[in-house]
Amino acid sequence: MEKKEQVRRKPTLIQGLIPILFMVVALTVGVGVLKLRTEPIIILSAFVAGIIAWRLGYTWKEMQDGVIEKIARALPATLILWSVGLLIGSWMFSGTVPMIIYYGVEIVNPQYLLVTAFIISAVLSTVTGTSWGSAGTIGVAIMGIAGGLGVSLPATAGAVVAGAYFGDKISPLSDTTNLAPIAAGSELYEHIKHMFWTTIPAAIVSLIVYFIVGMNSAGGASTPETVLVLQDQLSQMFNWNLILFLPVLLIIAGSLLKWPTIPTMLGTSLFSVLLGIFVQGYTLKNGFVSLIQGFNVSMTGFAGEVAPAVNTLINRGGVVSVTTTTVLIFCAMGFAGIISVSGMLDVVLEALLSKVKTTAGIILSTIASCATVAFVTGSSYLSILIPGELFKDAYVMRNLHPKNLSRTLEDSGTVLVPLIPWSAAGAYMTATLGVSTIEYLPWAVLNYMGIVFAILLAVTGIGITKLDGAKKEDKGAFGNAVNQEG
């Protein structure tokens, strides 16, 4: 006897909205009020979506297949994320990152402290891939210099935050920079290149503001003890050699020459371990530990008491450091898989797209969605993952390249979160820099100018890549059409 075919029904708009609204409310209460972990809330939201899908006639096997498909699509980018953990651990082991920091503090110019604060924080966060590490190390030192010079502390803190998140947006070592292409379905390096359309103009505006505001700030205050201790301990732990810049040059070359991302990162990581062995004199065993568990100052053999700023900088990296982000991705993909395979996401997008008729409309809707999730959850990860999954297919339907979506997710998700007082990033910056979020918010120019330029590009059509045979950027004020890889 033949098995009766399962009857499936198309979800209504209300049924499609229930799991999404449930997630928003649950995250608001759970994360925002009760300070619960995010992952169980997303799993609970997936369970709610699963009940609705079951009532629509979908079997667990079909839902499971949908989840597996989403995770499979995200796996290549997740492998890149793991490679980032390897790379950071190996760069700490080789002394590459510590050397950049050591010489970076040498160029602090008190006369143009705000400009310098932005640039150094940007360079450090780009090299390390962490806004928190940049603010917690060099940012603290810069705040000490500002206090000694009588420079505005809110303005200095804003410049540090803006610079730190410049690197967080474009560094291939940043978790959010890797997360945005995962959510949007684009590729890492094409995403970074596309980010320049909004990030570089926002950085230029920031530098102009900091130059004008800080041009009258000058003084002869001595270098604060924080910087001296940082430099002294780093110089005792590591040997400086120009060859330590080679790993950075390899990553840059790989980006420009479009080498395969994962092999480039893995090869650079192994090369960096060799540098740590032959230049620093560390052991092969500790090199492998750095790749997986992260680097630790104990590996240097430093006998004295390590300064907190040095600990914050050095004790990081390794595959283990990105596992939390990986778990969050898998949980989000589980939720996305169920609402996608059951058609719930389709009915929501159909309703949305029926109201949004233009390219500007869909990008502005994405910006509004990212900002809403950011304010509700205070999470840069969720402000990327949730809108990314909601709008991914909509961009393709409108003939828009996925990197338009990944860029918008970062412009209106990643950099907005540290401006929200109740977010973890806002609380961290306040505690670290000693200035409240509301006070430094106006001075974190890049963090909101990126959104301004994203809106301008959406309205004018400049820098918007279409999914067509030409594969070109639209012509605009930034110059002639620029060929793109896809």
Image (cartoon, rainbow, N blue to C red):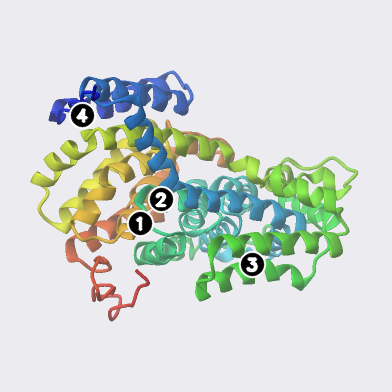
Q: Can residue 443 be seen at all in this image of the molecule?
A: no
Q: What type is the residue that disc 2 sits on?
A: Ala
Label whose residue precedes the other's in the sequence (1 or 2) = 2
In the displayed structure, 199 sits above or below 225; it is: below
- Taking the spot 67% from the left edge, 64% from the top edge, the residue there is 268
Q: What type is the residue that disc 1 sits on?
A: Arg
**Quick check: marks 4 and 2 in contact, CB under 8 Å?**
no
Q: Residues within 10 Å of mark 3 (few under 14, many from 20)?
A: some
How far is disc 1 from disc 2 in space, using C-alphas? 8 Å
- Taking the spot 83% from the left edge, 47% from the top edge, the residue there is 299
Q: What type is the residue that disc 4 sits on?
A: Leu
Q: Quadrant of residue 296?
A: top right
Q: Nearer the viewer, mark 1 or mark 4?
A: 4
Residue underneath mark 2 = 180
Residue underneath mark 4 = 17
Q: Nearer the viewer, mark 3 or mark 4?
A: 4
